[in-house]
Amino acid sequence: MLNAQEAEALILELVCPLHRERDGETVDLGVARDRILAATVASQLDFPHWDNSAMDGYAVRYADVQDCPVVLEIVEEIPAGVQPEKSLQSGQAARIFTGSVMPNGADTIVIQENTQRDRDRVTILQSPQFQEFVRQRASFYNAGNPLLSPGIAIGAPEMAILAAAQCTQLEVYRRPRVAILSTGDELVTPDSPLQPGQIVDSNQYALSTFVAQNGALPLPLGIVRDRAEQLKQTIAQAIISADIVLSTGGVSVGEYDLVDRILGELGGELHIRSVAVKPGKPLTVATFPHQKHPCLYFGIPGNPVSALVSCWRFVQPALKKLSGLSNYQPQWIIARSRDELRGAVKRETYLWGQLTFLEGKPEFALARGSKSSGNLIDLAQTTALARVPLGEKFIPTGEEVRVMLI
Ligand SMILES: Nc1nc2c(c(=O)[nH]1)N[C@H]1C(S)=C(S)[C@@H](COP(=O)(O)OP(=O)(O)OC[C@H]3O[C@@H](n4cnc5c(N)ncnc54)[C@H](O)[C@@H]3O)O[C@H]1N2
Ligand code: MOO
Ligand SMILES: [Mg+2]
């Protein structure tokens, strides 16, 4: 059985990331939110586009204002958005505002607070620094240089940059397609009255949401009975239509756990059968070498907590890498545990809860209730998984713990 680090490394190795030529598409800026850039973006504009003032005040020639107070003649007023008409001569100043274009001849801004105005004259009360409050053309960015790199997700700052750079069409990766199927004779949809022994297929909802939250397209294939033929048909369809397939249930050792056998029959190469983690020990990872289109199959345990923990711990980095994101590694931080954390000793144990901050220092608060992998009730508002390493019985309250952000 692999340990978690080995499994993570192997899974990431198996991922075939989307490729610009094959998987790139062009989208309008307005709908580019959360998409991942597939190509370097550059702008033909310098930033700032021209020398401009960072403050409301007066544009002056530094040589004129080294000995203050000094009186200058105001020859022009330059509101933002207007091209100055005059070139400043010695002894002259221009009234200027934040963002207004610097007039020729001026090299320095004196803020309004350090002046006294008298009609078309201004007294400079305090000598500024040379070039103070001037935002020089191209001092933030030179036209033609790389502006944004491929592999980054487009959030609010990137949207602002792209809009300012007038990049109205962008090359992004298509969204990965992730097929989701739930296996189990006991499963029904949430709207069905429950017969004895039945439970709702909550995994379909959990996994679809997880997939969508990671920027991919969920392809929900519904519930599949524990019948080899039906399962084989659905899985065969899933692996030709998706980049990743997530099935839940049927990966343990019972007679109805058919997934691994079927993957074998479909030509799958099984790279992982189980991982020494709790929850989430039965985890099947397969690829299909005979297939032209690469597909990574995750046979995830059926228990609802195990299913989500497996997704967070192993599917998420793989999905991010496949999406084209350059930053796909899981994020771990050290936090102080507010609770005692019990480990399974023979398996690296993940305990779900919340990351909070006390006086700026990270703390992990364990979810209440039973830590059974069948108990989804206390999963709500989970933001982090705390790790009790292999071989450790527990981490005492107040001690440091490694926590994975989800
Ligand atoms: N003899 C052994 N039994 C089990 C072992 C083992 O090592 N030896 N491993 C246990 C562990 S750990 C886990 S985790 C589970 C994994 O089981 P499967 O992946 O085969 O899943 P199922 O048997 O189909 O179901 C397990 C459990 O989860 C419920 N379930 C299934 N699908 C859903 C769904 N879509 N939504 C909500 N709940 C679901 C199902 O009803 C079962 O209660 O195996 C242990 N057994
Ligand atoms: O590995 Mo299972 O997910 O512990 O219950
Ligand atoms: Mg089972």
Image (spheres, rainbow, N blue to C red):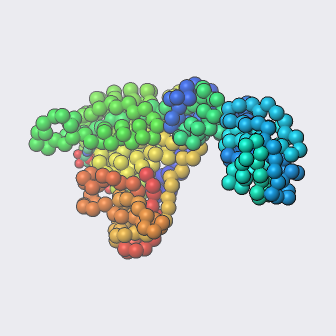
Q: What residue is drawn where x is 53% and y is 31%? A: 32
For the point 54% across and 47% down, which residue is it? Answer: 328
- x then y, percent, for residue 335: 45, 66
The image quadrant that residue 69 belongs to is bottom right
> Which image quadrant is residue 375 in?
bottom left
Does the image show residue 275? yes
Q: Residue at x 41, y 37 (%)?
A: 212
The foreground one among 358 and 329 is 358
| Residue 323 visible (yes or no) | no
Q: Which quadrant of the view contains residue 197? A: top left
**x and y, in percent, of residue 129 in the image:** 79, 56
Judge left or right: residue 140 versus residue 319: right
Q: What percent of the width, then of the height, locates residue 24?
A: 58, 28
| 98 in relation to 129, above or below | above
- The structure residue drawn at horizontal position 19% and vertical position 42%, both measured from the top left corner, is 199
Direction left: furthest residue: 196
Left or right: 361 with respect to 199? right
Question: Which quadrant would the N terminus be assigned to in this image?
Answer: bottom left
Image position, residue 313 (x, y; %): 44, 51
Viewer-proximal residue among 350 and 379: 379
Question: Taking 23 as reference, is 89 left or right?
Answer: right
Q: How many marks?
A: 0
